[in-house]
Amino acid sequence: MKLSLSVRIAESPRRKDRAELPIETLAPLARAAGFAGLSMRASAVSVSSTPKRTHQVRSVLDTNGLVASMVMGNVALAANTPDAPDCLQNIEPHLDLAEALGSRLVRVMMHSDAEIPHAQRAADTAAERGVTLAHQTHWGTLCETVDDSLALVESVGRTNFGITYEPANLLACGSAYGADAIARLAPHLVNVYFQNVRLDPYGALIFKSRYQGSVSLDYVALDDPRGIDPRPIIAALKAVGYDGWFSVHQPLRTGQSVPEAIEEAARTFMPLVASE
């Protein structure tokens, strides 16, 4: 596995359109901590960015020896708003952004079966450019559960359309997320995200799940035992031979600085991912 840091590490849980630090500052911190890649989001660069800005961001990545592990091209995808699936009807700008940043993975999102033909056409267009489309296991989408995710992959029926496994959303949506889930998803895994949450009826955040309704939770430290234990997850990923990106996808917690968050991520995951 290759360890990546999502630029979400510089975002608050509620603000997905801006970061506390520019990528010019974030990238050197990520590299110094030992990360090999950055998972890109609209808070750093988007399909609306100028070519000049996109080129600047690519230069920052190259200068720091970092790879763009995945590209998510707009705020709608990050915020899971009703227009998030629209990217499937105009995938070219997202592919252009990925190509400019040197990534071969683009995040997409789907809310209804009516979007399956759009996903098929988008995947065909992406395949012509050597890009894979990744749909995260996420509340309010067609990938809330493992069963949902497998059904969607089968319906789209494209080898370059796969799943980003993310256990916190699976937990919130009432789905299994452990070793058995990973084994079932393994043939279709193209990316892994990890954020740590604790279900709490009085939690500050709400995931609006289709199956579970509104689920309250809180973000906790990446190594907090009250949340999700990453150790068996990484062991299960290794057991199925997963060798793609593992991205720490955690926002800032209250009172936490970006350098502190990066140090926590490195301290938690470097020993686990490196010990192969």
Image: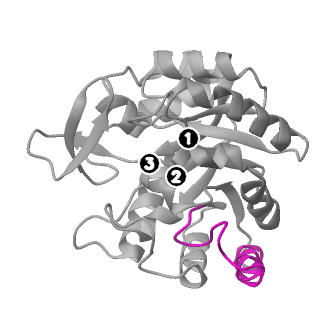
The disc labelled 3 sits on which kind of residue? Answer: Asn
- Residue at 60% from the left image edge and 75% from the top image edge: 27
- In the rendered view, does 253 fall on the left or right side of 66? left
Magenta-highlighted residues: 40-62
Marked residue nearer the N-terminal end (2 or 1): 2
- Disc 3 from disc 1: Cα separation: 8 Å
Query: In the picture shown, does residue 170 fall above or below 202?
Result: above
Whole-angstrom CA distance, mark 2 to mark 1, is 7 Å
Q: 10 Å neighbourhood of mark 1: few (<14), some, or many (≥20)?
A: many
> Which residue is nearer to you in this view: 51 or 87?
87
x, y percentage for residue 1?
Answer: 65, 42
Residue at label 2? 77
Against 206, residue 212 (above or below) is above
Q: Residues within 10 Å of mark 2 (few under 14, many from 20)?
A: many
Q: Residue at x 75, y 74 (%)?
A: 58
Q: Which residue is mark 1?
A: 109
Q: Identify the residue under disc 3.
A: 80
- Which amino acid type is marked by label 1? Met
Q: Tell me the kind of residue under disc 2.
A: Leu
Pointers 2 and 3 in contact (CB under 8 A)? Answer: yes
Q: How is the image coloured?
A: one colour
If you read the primary sequence from the N terminus, does the residue marked by circle 3 or circle 1 appear first?
3
